[in-house]
């Protein structure tokens, strides 16, 4: 397989997460607060690395205020890869974090080929609606678009001003070292991303430099590095250094990264159970052997089996059941077809329940995005 | 003398304006509307070049709406060089233009060494106060800071969004060709300047792409070139191509460019008449000959005589009187000392009147910048 490439704008090849920890200079996750054991993404090592996480753990343990800030790129249908971020947002909200969610529509506009209007539509109908259906309390969070920060001009100016002022403290060499070749559009969005992560600490927002956790996919770390570096150089503001955690990618159905641009690579949260079942049967990469006989004898490999991974990445919440599936698959007791059917059953149940939750969420979204409330 | 360097961030050497017209690809000013004959800066060729000025001339003649947009860099005391811009703003306001004035505090911050707070203070006490004293009707103009565009979040976002979206349509090669080497800070401010010039045409502001005249010193043309180029490439908006005029620099007292960073190079509009007189006597570069005998015989050179230039750049509004001074100086009838005294008399009269106008202007400024109105 080709050598891995992991940048904010492109992920390809086989990702070696432990090499990335070393290359990026991250720390492994350890000494988690007790509550984190309740959350499958931490318990199962899917969120696997961090920077300066300690201050967040302390805030949680000492019941001190902290901010959770992350972003979304409204690039297509909301799939199970995106759900990893949503689940973390909702988890931090349950822990009392002040929640900020940026729709990176300017970054998307500057690096892809869609209009702001399309991007806005996707952000609302796909992302926001599914976030709420999954459990986000929208009234207790600041969900905003990079292209339209706030109805309050003081807040809007404070946010964009920060992005502009950060520019002075970035150097081309640093930016090149972090991102490789950059267009003006990408540079502008990198600085706006830095403002996204830092602005909750401004006086116009939280008023105090609270610790801020930014949970992201590992491909987004360059944005963190730039924001962290500049934040400590800019004299006009005092920022608490950003904290971040990194999660692994849910593999796409065919075994590589789940990607919005290839419908055969993902299951969307709006797929029908039938559609989902068809995709699992047709595309889901198997860790099983070529023949039943060989499988019974040598067993399958759950680490590369997409059905197993989807169960691990959330469909099966019970660790013991998951462990049993893992063991049975490895021993050969469980066949690929059987494992696929277990995943399909779980998916069917999830998608049915999610559909009715989404219907309720749509009404919430309509209420908050109606012309009168905009 | 060294070869001239004319960039938005540095002007040095002897400026050859006719070479700049050719190098920059400008047009000379011609076919001016009749009203422009009343205005000394046009009549005397101090405003000397343009791009797409025709649509502004037509708007004025057909009484159609148009916008006047320009900016100021709050870099020090307000001197007679700055007055050239103020006089143009006030002139266009008298013609019915919708007036926008940007305080380029983010550009100043990103290229100089002052805090936003100091820059804001200077913009108000030096620039805004003197603009009003010179005749600007502040109630009929949109005077704003780049760092804080509007109290209205929709307007603020529309302005900053434009700067971000323009970034996608700029290329590094183009930016390098226009500006030479650029830091991220300068790139960010160049894009914000482009948004300054273009945003009055947005639906959130004038609502229509009215022709927009941007009167600037010739050193600011690179910003115009970038804004003009990108404005016609960005598909999301329809912009009427920007119009611009270019004025020459009022020479500094010692003969080079008037510069805020060298108090001996300028006369500030807040200098006392005594101070101004002292500066003229001590520093004002003379176009006269070394001895009275030689001067009487060969005559002086008004083109390089700073006292004469100050009279030409506004102190003497009467063309006939100015022409007589010119002739008398050339013929040797008028001595340098006499010419200096004429300039000093005019200056004294101006500064005295301006002082009382400024006292009244201060009250206007206090009213509009009081905490309750911010």
Image: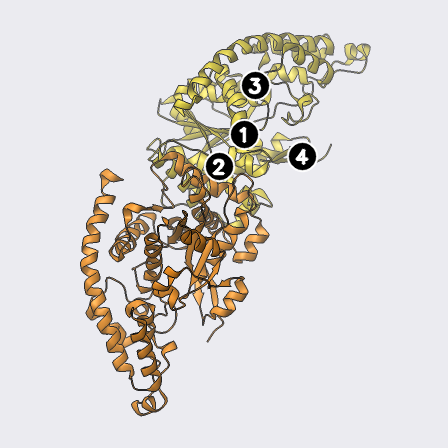
Chain colours: A orange, B yellow
Task: Work out whether B159 lies above or below A196.
Answer: above
Pointer 4 or 2: first along the chain: 4
* Residue B109 in picture, x, y percent from top left: 55, 36
> How far, Cα to Cα, is label 3 from label 1?
33 Å
Q: Which picture quadrant has residue B327?
A: top right
Pointer 3 or 1: first along the chain: 3
> How far, Cα to Cα, is label 2 from label 3?
29 Å
> How far, Cα to Cα, is label 1 from label 2?
17 Å
The residue pinned by badge 4 equals B4
At mark 3, the secondary structure is loop
Q: Nearer the viewer, residue A99 or B12?
A: A99
At mark 2, the secondary structure is helix
In the image, B277: left or right of A129?
right
* Residue B8 in picture, x, y percent from top left: 58, 35
Task: Work out whether B54 lies above or below A248.
Answer: above
Crowd rating for badge 4 (residues with CA inside 10 Å; few <14, some 14–19, many 20+): few
The residue pinned by badge 2 equals B193
Task: Work out whether A188 lies above or below B6.
Answer: below
């Amino acid at each position: 397989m080709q050598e891995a490439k992991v940048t904010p704008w492109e992920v390809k090849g086989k990702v070696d997460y432990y090499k990335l920890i070393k290359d990026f200079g991250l720390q492994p996750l350890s000494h988690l607060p007790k509550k984190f054991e309740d959350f499958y993404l931490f318990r199962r090592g899917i969120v696997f690395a961090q920077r300066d996480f300690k201050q967040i753990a302390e805030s949680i343990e000492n019941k001190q205020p902290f901010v959770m800030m992350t972003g979304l790129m409204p690039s297509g249908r909301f799939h199970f890869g995106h759900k990893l971020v949503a689940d973390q947002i909702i988890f931090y909200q349950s822990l009392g974090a002040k929640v900020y969610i940026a729709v990176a529509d300017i970054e998307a506009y500057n690096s892809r080929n869609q209009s702001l209007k399309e991007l806005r539509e996707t952000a609302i109908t796909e992302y926001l609606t599914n976030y709420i259906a999954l459990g986000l309390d929208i009234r207790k969070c600041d969900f905003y678009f990079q292209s339209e920060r706030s109805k309050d001009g003081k807040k809007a100016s404070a946010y964009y001003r920060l992005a502009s002022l950060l520019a002075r403290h970035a150097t081309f060499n640093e930016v090149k070292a972090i991102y490789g070749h950059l267009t003006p559009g990408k540079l502008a969005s990198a600085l706006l991303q830095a403002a996204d992560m830092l602005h909750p600490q401004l006086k116009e927002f939280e008023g105090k430099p609270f610790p801020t956790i930014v949970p992201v996919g590992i491909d987004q770390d360059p944005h963190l590095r730039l924001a962290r570096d500049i934040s400590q150089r800019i004299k006009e503001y005092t920022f608490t250094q950003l904290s971040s955690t990194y999660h692994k990618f849910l593999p796409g159905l065919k075994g590589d990264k789940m990607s919005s641009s290839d419908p055969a690579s993902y299951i969307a949260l709006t797929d029908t159970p039938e559609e989902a079942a068809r995709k699992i049967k047709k595309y889901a990469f198997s860790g099983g052997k070529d023949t039943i006989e060989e499988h019974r004898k040598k067993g399958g490999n759950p680490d590369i089996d997409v059905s197993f991974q989807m169960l691990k990445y959330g469909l099966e919440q019970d660790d013991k059941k998951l462990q049993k599936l893992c063991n049975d698959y490895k021993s050969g007791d469980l066949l690929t077809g059987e494992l696929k059917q277990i995943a399909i059953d779980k998916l069917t149940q999830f998608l049915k329940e999610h559909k009715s939750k989404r219907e309720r969420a749509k009404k919430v979204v309509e209420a908050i995005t109606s012309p009168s409330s905009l």
